[in-house]
Image (cartoon, rainbow, N blue to C red):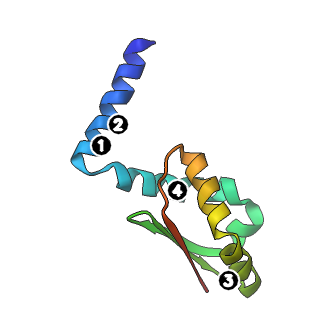
Amino acid sequence: MKNGADISEALVDFLRESGLEQSVMDVQIEEVWPRVMGETVKKLTRSIEVREGVLYVHVNSAALKTQLFENRFELIRKLNEAVGAPALKDCRILG
């Protein structure tokens, strides 16, 4: 299994050196959003976007906006944990 580990390390090094690592993590965050947040939040989310480590969440509900804002640091922790890297530095919740 060492060859698999070597390839994985080489890919991570390539992404880091080419400046693509953050872009890949941004896409990963967008992909895990529904799984981490659940079906109800998914339905009330208009869109999410990650740019340079900042998550922008557009929601349809004022109550959800408040709840996500109050729990934004936990949200960042859970999403970073889901992708296995410190991909997010901040979170903006927008109505």
What's under tag 1, amino acid-wise? Leu
Q: Of 8 and 71, which appears nearest the observer?
A: 71
Q: Of 81 and 32, which appears nearest the observer?
A: 81
The residue lying at 46 percent from left, 12 percent from top is 1
In the rendered structure, which disc, 4 or 3, sits on the residue that comes first in sequence? 4
What's under tag 3, amino acid-wise? Asn
- Asked which secondary structure carries label 4, the reply is helix
Mark carried by residue 60: 3
Residue on which the image places disc 4:
29
Q: Nearer the viewer, mark 4 or mark 3?
A: 4
Q: Position of residue 11 (x, y in %)?
A: 32, 34
Q: Nearer the viewer, mark 2 or mark 3?
A: 2
Looking at this rendering, what residue extends furthest in the left direction? 18
Mark carried by residue 15: 1
Q: CA distance from mark 4 to mark 3?
A: 20 Å
Q: Is residue 8 left or right of residue 89?
A: left
In the rendered structure, which disc, 2 or 3, sits on the residue that comes first in sequence? 2
Q: Are marks 2 and 1 in contact (CB under 8 Å)?
A: yes
The residue lying at 39 percent from left, 51 percent from top is 24
* Above or below, comparing residue 85 to residue 7 in the picture: below
- Asked which secondary structure carries label 3, the reply is loop
In the rendered structure, which disc, 3 or 1, sits on the residue that comes first in sequence? 1
Q: Position of residue 31 (x, y in %)?
A: 54, 54
* Above or below, comparing residue 17 to residue 60 in the picture: above
What's under tag 4, amino acid-wise? Ile
What's under tag 2, amino acid-wise? Val
Q: Nearer the viewer, mark 4 or mark 2?
A: 2
Q: CA distance from mark 2 to mark 1?
A: 5 Å
Image quarter of residue 57 = bottom right
Q: Position of residue 93 (x, y in %)?
A: 59, 78
Q: CA distance from mark 3 to mark 1?
A: 35 Å
